[in-house]
Image (spheres, rainbow, N blue to C red):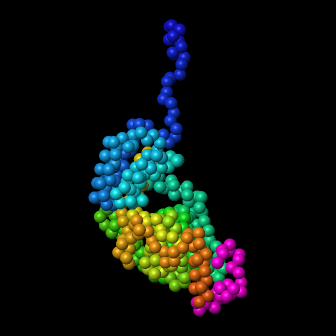
Amino acid sequence: MTDTARTAQALPARTEPALPEHTLRPEEIPAIVAEIGRLVREFYVFPEIAEQLVGIIEDRAAQGRYEATADAGALAALLSEDLQSVNGDRHLRVLFHPYPVPAEPGGAMMTRLTREADLSLGGVPLVRRMTGGVALLELAPILFPTDMTGESLVAALNLVARAEALILDLRECVGGAPHTVALICSYLLDRPTHLNTIYDRADDDFTQSWSVPMVHGPKFGGSKPLYLLTSRRTFSAAEELTYDLQQLGRATVVGERTGGGANPRKGFTLHPHLEASIPTARAINPVSGTNWELVGITPDIETDPAEALATAHRAALVAVAGSAADSLSAEEARRILAGERPPGGDGTVL
C-alpha cells in the first residue's frame, strides 16, 4: 500500500457540512411549495378562491420567488403573504415553529397548545375580586380544548359565579376551541342557547353549537352585568365568544375592534418547523346570519385597550350600585361612586 493510500484510509469519511437548524435544503423548497398548493386546493373552505391562490403560488414559484429562501421562517412569511393576497384570510398562512413539531395532521398545533397551556395555568392566568363586588377573569393566550383546561376553567367560573358583575378580559386571547366557547357561555346563560353554526367543506354539512343546561358547580347566570374586554389581538375563538354573547345581547363589549378571523382552521405539517394553517369551515351566527371575518367585532364602548378595564369597571360599578341588590358589595359600589371611598386595593384607577 502506498503512503497516499494509507493517508486516504486514515482520513474520516467526507460529510456534508451541518446546516443551521432552521435552514432549508434547496431540494426541500419545491416540495413544500407544491404541498401547500395541494392542501389549499383540497381543503380551503372557499374552493374558487383556493384555485386563484394555487395559481398565484405556482406562478411565483416559476418566477423563483421561493427557491432562494433558505430560512424556514422567511419562507413561511413569503407563503403567508401570497396566501392572504386574494381575500386577506388571516387564518390561511404558513406558521414557523422554532421547535420541531410532529408530522401527523394537527400535531404542530397540539404541541403549541400543550406548551402554552403549561405556561398559562391552562389559559386562566388571573382571577380577581375588584371593588363593588366585580369579578375579573382573564382568559389568555388561548381558549384551550376542554381536556387541557377543563379543571382550571370550571374552577375559575365557579369562583366568579357569586360576583355582582363580571369582566372577562380577552385582550390577549388569540384563539382556541369552539367547544370551550360553548362551555364558557353555558356558565353565562340561563338556558340552552344556539350560539353558532359551522359549515364544513369536507362534509358539506352544518353543525350547530349550543350552550348546555347543566354545568359543574354554580354559574354566573344570564342576568347579572357582564363585560368583555377586547383589542385588535382578540382573534378567532376569542372573537366567537365575544360575538356570540354580543349578538345575544348578553354582554357589553369594551375596548378595541377585534382582529377579524372567523374561519375555523386545521393544521398540516409541511416540514419539522413549518405548519400549513388551512381554514376548512366558516361560522354563521344564528342572530346576524353572518360572522366577523375580516371586519372584526365593533365594541359597544370603544376605548383604548389600555383603558378598557377601568372603563368596564366603572360601568360595572354603576350597574351594581343601580341594582336593587341589598348586599355589602352593592353598598360598596354606591359609596365608591359617591366619592365616599376610593377604589384602592385592586390596582384599578377609575
The reply, left or right, for residue 313 in relation to residue 177 is right
Image: magenta residue range: 323-350
Which residue is at the front of the view, 302 or 3? 302
Residue drawn at x 65%, y 88% as measured from the top left: 334
Look at the picture and state if 80 lies above or below 345: above
Q: Can residue 161 be seen at all in this image of the molecule?
A: no
The reply, left or right, for residue 16 in relation to residue 50 is right
Residue drawn at x 50%, y 46% as measured from the top left: 100
Look at the picture and state if 252 lies above or below 92: below
Residue drawn at x 42%, y 59% as measured from the top left: 90
The reply, left or right, for residue 337 in relation to residue 52 is right
Q: Main secondary structure of the magenta part?
A: loop
Across and down, in percent, residue 328 comes to 67, 87
* Residue 349 within the magenta-colored segment of the rendering: yes
Which residue is at the front of the view, 208 or 303? 303
In which quadrant of the rendered view does residue 309 lie?
A: bottom right
Across and down, in percent, residue 215 comes to 51, 76
The quarter of the image holding the C terminus is: bottom right
Across and down, in percent, residue 346 comes to 68, 74
Residue drawn at x 55%, y 58% as measured from the top left: 116
Residue reaching furthest top?
2
